[in-house]
Structure formats: C-alpha cells, structure tokens
Image (cartoon, helix red, strand yellow):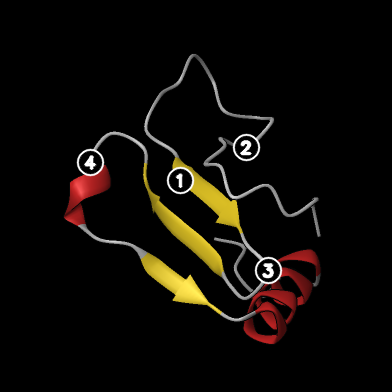
Amino acid sequence: MPLVTGEWFLPRRSWNNSYCVETKFTKDAVYVRNNRRPDAGTAVFDHAEWAVFIAGVKDGDYDL
C-alpha cells in the first residue's frame, strides 16, 4: 500500500491524464473516483477490502 497521503493521485501508468481512476489513501480507507468526473461519485473501501481487490488483480481475476 502506498503511504497514507490523504491526497488524490493518478496511477503511474496513466497516459496524458486521460480517463483514469484517481485513488486516495487515508488512515481508515481507500477512495477511488473518475479523474474526469470527480463529482460523479466515489467508491470507498477499507484497507482489508482493498488488499483483497489488489490480490485479485495480481492473480488475473479481472483480466479481459
């Protein structure tokens, strides 16, 4: 997990600030939103939920 910054950031692999998700890590939660439409809503996960999601991504559970 990245350092708890409390600030929104884009993934390292985002291209030219195109449509991506922004993420913000706080002490208690992980927030995810669309960088082009931040007012459209934010998904909130606790750190355990986020860890399960990341493990699934690394295992290929979300490959298309």
Residue 2 as seen in the image, left or right of residue 42? right
Instruction: Tell me the crowding category of disc 4: few under 14, some 14 to 19, or many 20 or more residues within 10 angstroms, Cα based.
Output: few
Q: CA distance from mark 4 to mark 1?
A: 10 Å
Q: Looking at the image, which residue is at 52% across and 41% down?
A: 8
Q: Marks 1 and 2: CB-CB under 8 Å?
A: yes
For the residues carrying marks 1 and 3, which lies nearer the camera in this image? 3
- Disc 1 target residue: 21
Q: Marks 4 and 2: CB-CB under 8 Å?
A: no
Residue 44 as seen in the image, left or right of residue 3? left
Instruction: Tell me the crowding category of disc 2: few under 14, some 14 to 19, or many 20 or more residues within 10 angstroms, Cα based.
Output: few
- Disc 2 target residue: 11
Q: Marks 3 and 4: CB-CB under 8 Å?
A: no
Residue type beneath disc 2: Pro
- Disc 4 target residue: 37
Height in image: 23 above or below 17? below
Measuring from the top left, give residue 24's x and y in whole percent.
Answer: 56, 52
